[in-house]
Amino acid sequence: MVVPAWAWLATIGGLIVLFAIDLFIVDRKPHEVTVGEAGRWVGFYIACAIAFGAAIWAFSGAQYAGEFFAGYITEYSLSVDNLFIFLIIMSAFSVPKIHQHRVLLVGIVIALVMRGIFIAVGAVAIAKFSWVFYLFGLFLVYTAWQLARTGMGEDEEYQENAMTKLTRRVFPVTDNYHGAKSFVKLDGKRFVTPMFIVMIAIGTADLLFAVDSIPAIFGLTKEPFLVFTANAFALMGLRQLYFLLGGLLKKLVYLSVGLAVILGFIGVKLVLEALHTNTLPFINGGEALSVPTIGIEVSLSVIVSVLVITTVASLIKTRRDDSNSSDITEPAEQKL
């Protein structure tokens, strides 16, 4: 897939326009984002991703469109893991609800820039060293096992990372928020506010999740353009998903299992592709092995099916648990 420079510039320009629209419309008057408002914006961003995928289909064919949609769905589903950390960070910094949207917006812009760098490095590594797929595949299988064993980590306490601590050391920080301001001047001295610190925390925390999500999408497409755009659309819709899901996150009890299955599946897919194009001298004398590979159609079907089954199973279990809890509580109340 040959992507001309103008297509890159037009895509990045379009993404900037979408961010600007979101900022000026939603955050023009700081307010607590309602579920209905968040739902409409989630629908808008999903529609934008679908339209972009349709454009890829029209100009480059079904194969690349399928790779984009598979990557987008995978990145969007894996980003739910980010939401748990975002909730923890918002709580740890006591961010006022009316300013949470701005925090997420700026934090995700930082995250997208950092992911762009990560994607560029990954693309170069893959182009020069085909054996990188072995590392990516084994890492994803290990990550899947860890995720299935420990879950999403929603009960963890937030620990500031190195970048956030460095920011605190470099800049004096005020004790309190000053509206939506990131910088203030007090007694002739310039300070950063907790708003600035929490934006850094959100943006840099995402890089931790990119460590598994970027190798995962490279397992679905080797095209840097598709990897970047799938990540961009997933991150743009993530802010509104944060407000839409809210407390519903805890109802998705099997989500970690579903994501583990997806990561494990993509990890196996990567290892099979690495064996199919093997160049390592200590494996089959450096010759490729005749092993089956998994096409994008199968990958897309597996990803969607796992997410649907996981979501339905989670909601059924949650409803049963709530029903059993009410059945136990009711007799006790009658006895009193």
Image (cartoon, rainbow, N blue to C red):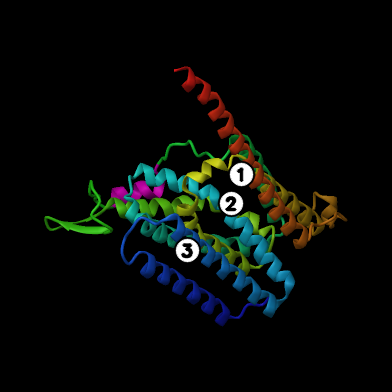
- Segment tinted magenta in the rendering: 160-170
| Residue displayed at 48% across by 76% down | 13
> Along the horizontal axis of the image, is 178 left or right of 312?
left
User: CB atoms at circles 2 and 3 under 8 Å apart?
Assistant: no
Q: Quadrant of residue 257?
A: top right
**Nearer to us in this view, 40 or 70:** 40
Which quarter of the rendering shows the C terminus?
top left
Report which residue position mark 2 lands on: 78
Question: Can the viewer see residue 290 in this picture?
Answer: yes
Q: Is residue 10 left or right of residue 301?
A: left
Give the farthest residue toward the right.
290
Q: Is 75 displayed left or right of 200 in the figure?
A: right
**Could you say which is closer to the camera, residue 165 or residue 330?**
330
Occupied quadrant, residue 70: bottom right
Q: Distance between the Cα atoms at labels 3 and 1?
A: 27 Å
Measure the C-alpha gap from mark 1 to mark 2.
Answer: 10 Å
Verify whether residue 328 appears in magenta: no
Figure check: 306 above or below 332: below
Could you say where residue 214 lies in the image, as x and y percent from the top left? 60, 56
Label 1 packing within 10 angstroms: few (<14), some (14-19), many (20+): many
Amino acid at the residue labelled 2 = Leu
Give the number of the disc on residue 113.
Answer: 3
Q: Which residue is mark 1?
A: 255
